[in-house]
Image (cartoon, helix red, strand yellow):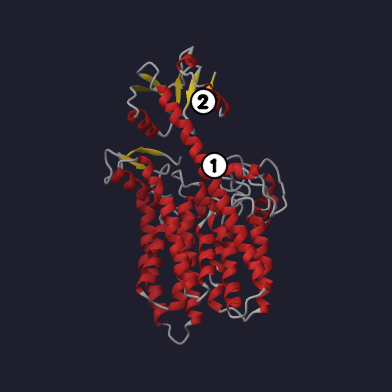
Amino acid sequence: QEGTRLAETNPYLRGSFVVQSGYQYSFGNLLAAYLAHLTGNLNAGKAVTPILAVASFGIAFGGLASLALPGGWCLALALLAALNPVAIAQSSSYYIDGHTGSLFTAMLFSALRLLVTGLNADGLAALVVSFLGLSASKTSGLFYGVIIDVVFLVFYALTHLKNLRPMLVFFGISALVTWPVGMLFRKVGGFPALTPEYLLSATNPATSGYGVGKDSFGLDAMLKLDRLQIFVMSYFAPTEIVADRVKTKFPFALNRRELSVFEDLTPDARAGGFGPLYGGCLLLALGSLGVIVLGSPPPFVTLFPILPVILSVGLTQTWWARWAPQGWLIPATLMVPLLCSLATGPAGRRWVLPGLVLFSGLLNSILILLFYSVGCVKAQRVLNSQLTFIKELTQPLSVYMPRYKSNRIWLIRGGNQFDLVSEVPPKPRLRLMRTETLIPLPTKWEENLENAPVVAEWRKRRLIEE
């Protein structure tokens, strides 16, 4: 969906398909291109999103385990962090925001592990690789990485006052290696120059296209609100692709209409974008912090994950899940000091609220994954029926493909002969599932297709234009 084109500009993939995000190459785009090149399958590049999510789970689990938390709680909390709804909702596309969310998670928890265990090679490697990937994923990713890095250095200095040598090592690596290389990655990738005007436009909620206005579909009411109010307005609202007005809902309400947003395979829900139960999960997480008084004070380092998440979300478009996917981590990071506090005491009812936080968050992500997977199966079935049908049409086909010309691979693999045309074909015409590709149909096209349920499904999805 972000755009796929032939690799005239990529020296590694010249003459083959490469995934490209509009005008720039991101870390995820290049990984996807290499996967597509190695396998010969364009769809293989989409595996980058789940691969990064799995990697973030492993790193998050390692960071939590270093705190000596019970294994079951580590597993549940790492799953909650890794199952970011933005990554789930983009796992069958070439959108790159899910990459940003997973890399943010990986860097955050690798830094947490280094705070707990001290300087070690594998932890340092995970931190550096996560930062470089994050800085090359999106413009915002570079700043998210710097925020994590700076907060990490401050916490390391405060917790290792008797031995600051490792902190100096970390600072030297950041200042001399990761930050400059991160800037270099942006330049190689063709990202916009970091001018003051660009930075202001990308962080100011009042900027049309980034914050409010017709290009972002942000409500004009946001102009009168601060960032916290915008955040609450979005994530305590029903999940929708685009909201037409300010709405609120009971934060623990769950209905199929909201989940159908993910079944429709939208990669960019702009109201309630973390799913229908995120607001409830966040409320439970905030409420359960009061349980800390029943346990021993949590270690200071357990407060570390909270600060980079809050700072990075607060400095960008707080309402837009795709723009700030790390907002999903707020409940998970609030749980880290709480679980460490409770782990030192006996089991009892005080574990109920933290358990509900994890249950509601995991239920939210699992339901999104389930509905999204069902939507993928349905969409693929419809597309397969269309590709089977057009093989029976008179060849060569006149195909209108205004964007994403890599879609022609479906026609090539199906053995179709076709010519790309520059003008919209006359009606009746068939639009291929989830694309802008149009193929003209003969006047009595239904005579070529005796499967009435298939035709009904196409019409239901508005794939027949008559």
What residue did someone put label 1 on?
A: 266
Q: From the viewer's perspective, tell me whether residue 140 is left or right of residue 411.
A: right
Residue type at numbered disc 1? Thr
Compare marks 1 and 2 and give the one earlier in the sequence. 1
Inspect this view and state whether residue 381 appears.
Answer: yes
Quarter of the image for residue 315 reads bottom right
Q: Which mark is residue 454?
A: 2
- Please name whichever residue, 123 or 29, is drawn nearer the observer in this view of the structure: 123
**Three-letter amino acid code at disc 2?**
Val
Q: Nearer the viewer, residue 352 or 137?
A: 352
Distance of mark 1 from mark 2, alpha carbons? 23 Å
Quadrant into which the C terminus falls: top right
Within 10 angstroms of label 1, few (less than 14), some, or many (20 or more) residues?
some
For the point 40% across and 58% down, the residue is: 133
Disc 2: CA contacts within 10 A as few (<14), some (14-19) or many (>=20): some
Q: Residue at x 44, y 65 (%)?
A: 59
Q: Nearer the viewer, residue 364 or 268?
A: 364
**Residue, far top:** 443
Most distant residue in the bottom direction: 162
Toward the viewer: 258 or 94?
A: 258
In the picture provided, is 159 more to the left or to the right than 248?
left
At mark 2, the secondary structure is helix
What is the quadrant of residue 220 in the picture?
top right
Residue 336: x %, y % from top left: 56, 70
Rendered location of residue 95, percent (x, y): 46, 46
Residue 265 in the image: state x and y as whole percent.
Answer: 53, 41
In front: label 1 or label 2: 2
